[in-house]
Image: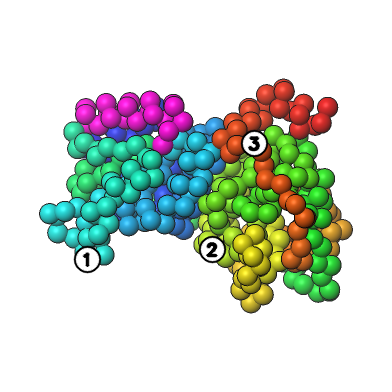
């Protein structure tokens, strides 16, 4: 069917933000998305889900596009991010390895189980019709599901879309301007001490995103606020989530609080973040060289130079922070100067005893953050503590 007309039907329904990973079956729709919409090319399909999810919370109806072999890369955020937070994404996943259609051997099993996998993840789906008028009706049905906070995926067979040439792309060159590596002893504070400093610098335009595990739980205990989001599951996705929110809400200051175990899972996100380089995002890595929430098993972070990696990926500033005073000073400076910034701080493997878990449900966290973003006066009053 005509890709342009189908794309315009998506626009009429309000879908304006796209993220994905290339697939030959979806290349025409991806090309049209790049040509005509806000499109973020993710390093992997799970990152694309996180990026698009945050953009939705930021006020843009979002679409993810992927090959079905990459659907497995997205299982974690589909089951532990969009499901508990009730984030309604529209998805297009190709059907490589369709039974009876010759394809590469690596697609054979996935072709058999794609729709079963979507059903197991509680994702509503339909095969996308190749007839334009029928496809328009399907889009309306999908949009109704989206309006009920339910994700909806179309499974796309070979030859569904006609050719759509990709317009010439102008690749941006992102370069690091400020690089400060370690040059003195590290204070090694506890995580909750670092979080308290980070929280003390926030204002009414700040959104704080805490990675899954004890980081989110400790931030919740320090201060539960409407401009906080505590990730649950979807480990490694917090900076991609921050990217989507920063791009969709350029007037907000997006503070991403990450951990070494989390970032190591999805280091490709650093390259994506650096390329799109939102001016309003700061990415803070608190490194205790351990998976502390699950028993203190060591990570390999001691062998990684995160500051230089972030710099090489195009973060405007990449800074090793040695103590709490430097952490506060860097945060205050960033609020004045902006620019995509990476702060790295070594912390001790120490957390508070009897650490609580958030009593508020993930979808309630999402809903109050949406109200905060929309400048609901009640939410602003709560954040200010008045």
The residue most toward the top is 377
Q: Nearer the viewer, residue 356 or 333?
A: 356
Q: Earlier in the sequence, mark 1 or mark 2?
A: 1
Picture quarter with the N terminus: top left
Residues at marks 2 and 3, CA–CA distance in whole angstroms: 27 Å
**Residue 267 x/y as whole percent:** 55, 63
Main secondary-structure element of the magenta-colored stretch: helix
In this rendering, which labeled residue sits more in front, label 2 or label 3? 3
Give the residue at x 22% y 56%: 97
* Figure check: 265 above or below 158: below
Secondary structure beneath label 3:
loop
The stretch of residues the image draws in magenta is 132-151
Quadrant in which residue 88 is drawn: top left
The residue most toward the front is 354
**Residue 93 x/y as whole percent:** 32, 47
Residue position for label 1: 105
Q: Nearer the viewer, residue 13 or 149?
A: 149
Residue position for label 3: 360
Give the residue at x 55% y 45%: 244
Q: Nearer the viewer, residue 39 or 365?
A: 365
* Figure check: 171 above or below 296: above
In this rendering, which labeled residue sits more in front, label 3 or label 1? 3
Can residue 372 be seen from the camera position used here?
A: yes
Residue position for label 2: 265
Q: Earlier in the sequence, mark 2 or mark 3?
A: 2
Secondary structure beneath label 2:
helix
Can residue 347 be seen from the camera position used here?
A: no
Number of residues whose C-alpha sits closer than 10 Å to that of mark 3, classed few (under 14), some (14–19) or many (20 or more)? few
């Amino acid at each position: 069917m005509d890709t342009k007309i189908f794309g315009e039907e998506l626009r009429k329904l309000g879908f304006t933000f796209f993220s994905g990973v290339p697939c030959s079956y979806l290349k025409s729709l991806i090309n049209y998305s790049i040509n005509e919409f806000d499109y973020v090319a993710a390093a992997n399909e799970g990152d694309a889900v996180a990026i698009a999810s945050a953009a939705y919370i930021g006020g843009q109806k979002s679409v993810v596009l992927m090959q079905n072999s990459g659907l497995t890369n997205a299982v974690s955020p589909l089951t532990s991010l969009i499901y508990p937070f009730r984030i309604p994404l529209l998805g297009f996943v190709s059907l490589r390895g369709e039974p009876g259609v010759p394809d590469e051997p690596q697609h054979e099993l996935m072709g058999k189980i794609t729709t079963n996998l979507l059903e197991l993840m509680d994702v509503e789906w339909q095969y996308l019709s190749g007839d334009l008028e029928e496809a328009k009706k399907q889009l309306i049905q999908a949009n109704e599901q989206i309006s009920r906070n339910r994700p909806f995926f179309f499974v796309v067979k070979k030859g569904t879309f006609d050719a759509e040439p990709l317009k010439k792309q102008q690749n941006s060159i992102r370069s690091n301007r400020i690089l400060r590596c370690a040059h003195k002893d590290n204070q090694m504070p506890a995580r909750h001490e670092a979080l308290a400093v980070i929280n003390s610098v926030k204002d009414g335009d700040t959104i704080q995103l805490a990675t899954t595990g004890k980081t989110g739980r400790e931030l919740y205990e320090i201060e539960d606020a409407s401009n906080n989001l505590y990730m649950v599951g979807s480990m490694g996705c917090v900076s991609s989530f921050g990217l989507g929110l920063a791009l969709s809400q350029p007037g907000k200051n997006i503070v991403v609080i990450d951990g070494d175990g989390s970032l190591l899972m999805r280091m490709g996100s650093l390259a994506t973040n650096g390329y799109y380089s939102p001016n309003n995002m700061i990415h803070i890595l608190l490194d205790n060289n351990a998976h502390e929430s699950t028993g203190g098993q060591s990570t390999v972070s001691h062998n990684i130079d995160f500051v230089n990696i972030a710099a090489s990926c195009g973060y405007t500033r990449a800074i090793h922070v040695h103590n709490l005073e430097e952490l506060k000073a860097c945060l205050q400076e960033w609020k004045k100067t902006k620019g995509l910034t990476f702060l790295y701080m070594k912390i001790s493997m120490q957390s508070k005893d009897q650490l609580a878990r958030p009593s508020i449900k993930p979808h309630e966290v999402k809903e109050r953050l949406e109200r905060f973003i929309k400048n609901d006066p009640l939410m602003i009053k709560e954040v200010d503590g008045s």
